[in-house]
Amino acid sequence: MYGHLISPLPPIAGEELPHIGAGLRFLEAPTAYLQELRARHGDTYLLDIFGFNLLMTFAPKGLENLYKLEEEKASFGLATYDMIGFKTPSEIFQDADIGLFYQLLLNKRMPGYVVTINDLVNIELQRWQGFDRIDIFDAIRTLEQRVGYGLWIAKEAAADAYWPALKRHFDVIGQESAFVNPQQTLETIKSNKAREKAAVAEIKELLKKIIDEHDNNPRKEYAAADFLREHFSGDSADDRARKLAHNIINTNQGFLSNLYAAIAWVIVRLLQHADVMAQVKAEIAAVRAHYGENFYTSIDALNTLCILEQVMMESVRLAQRSLTLRKVVTPLEFDDGQQNYTVQPGVYIATMLSVTNIQSAELAEFDPAHFQKNQIVNSLAPTGKETISTFGHGKHACPAQRFSHHMCKIVVAKILANFELTAEFDDPQPSARQMGGVARPDEAVIVQLNAK
């Protein structure tokens, strides 16, 4: 049945109902299901999920070769579109330029970004002063949205006149629902993305007002909107406006996809581990003493927060639920270390990070010492570094890793400087249903705030 897709055929993971049975079990608990299939079939097997054929591999050599696949042979971009295209209006993808996203994340831009992040986090934490208790994931998500509008549109977008409306509409088109709770995607498909299209139209109207205010601000700061308009300056006015809006939307969505959950898990882990909290506070105090009260805006100062960086890496490792996919677009050879497969177009070569990230007793436990800054300790990955993943590997590694570390350090250090936190939770767990990105918990994670 599948011989025309892969030769020789690997073990085939089947259920009583072809296509559907595996899909339903996968949606219910993807990590647990893939672990079960691995125990049954070995490190490499073929899985048919609602007609999507996934060559799953967890073999060390298979993972190494998965991360080496060239985009023109096995596409990360097409696989990503297939995963989140159910939710996002397709015209956004048609205009979005991944090259611009990479340009926005160039290291030379970071000094300006940390200043903007610092300013906007200060404003949002002032709003937190009115709260006694927060859901830490929801609160960090809102904070990151507001910062994102200031970073990826213009600072004016983070003002009270605009950010609540932007948030309302961006929440409708949020790509994360495609992998946090994929069951919700059915309603989007049934409606032909009606709510999503309406939200995009509202965002475009808001962008016109924001950019007009930005252009008329005598103290305006150079913004992402300016950079994008310069890039599209050779297009017609209508094309320029459309491309500007779609790239702004795409960048803000990408910014929100994982980082807020990662930062929230850092707060959770610190509250669960008093010894680690004490180490992080001592490290922050030492950096403050050396660099001064405004160390948050110094790249050098942020780079010295090594313990906090390790806490972030370890928190992401444990919560990572990414389904890593490459869509084969031209026939290729794929070697998993035990067998060389000829794979035809249309097949997805895939792995799921949560299956291998916690595959030993030691890796199942939280310990920031598992990392040295942002590198896993070699002894924990004796068969290859690709068996443990946080921000990915190789050419498709997350381009925003350094940016993410800077933002996490600023946000966490400022929260700890402004509030005493008390956990009102026991032991939050990553959602068993999540099939992509950094996991969200199934329930609210409440933290008590006491302003200092």
Image (cartoon, rainbow, N blue to C red):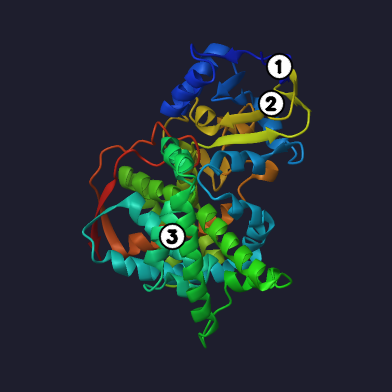
Which kind of residue does numbered mark 3 sit on?
Answer: Gln
Residue 44, position as x, y percentages in the image? 62, 19
Quarter holding the C terminus is bottom left
Dot 2: within a 10 Å radius of its alpha carbon, few (fewer than 14), some, or many (20 or more) residues?
some
Answer whether residue 358 is visible to the viewer in this image.
Answer: yes
The answer to which of 281 and 59 lies nearer the viewer is 59
Labels 3, 1: front one = 3
Is residue 332 left or right of 200 when viewed as pictured?
Answer: right
The residue to which callout 1 is attached is 338
First in sequence: mark 3 vs mark 1: 3
Q: Tell me the crowding category of disc 3: few under 14, some 14 to 19, or many 20 or more residues within 10 angstroms, Cα based.
A: many
The numbered mark at residue 145 is 3
Residue 228 x, y percent position in the rendering:
64, 68
Would residue 7 be found to the left or right of residue 269 on screen? right
Residue sitting at x 48%, y 34%: 435
Residue annotated with mark 2: 61
Number of the front mark, 3 or 2: 3
How dense is the environment of label 1, judged by Cα within 10 Å: few (below 14), some, or many (20 and up)?
A: few
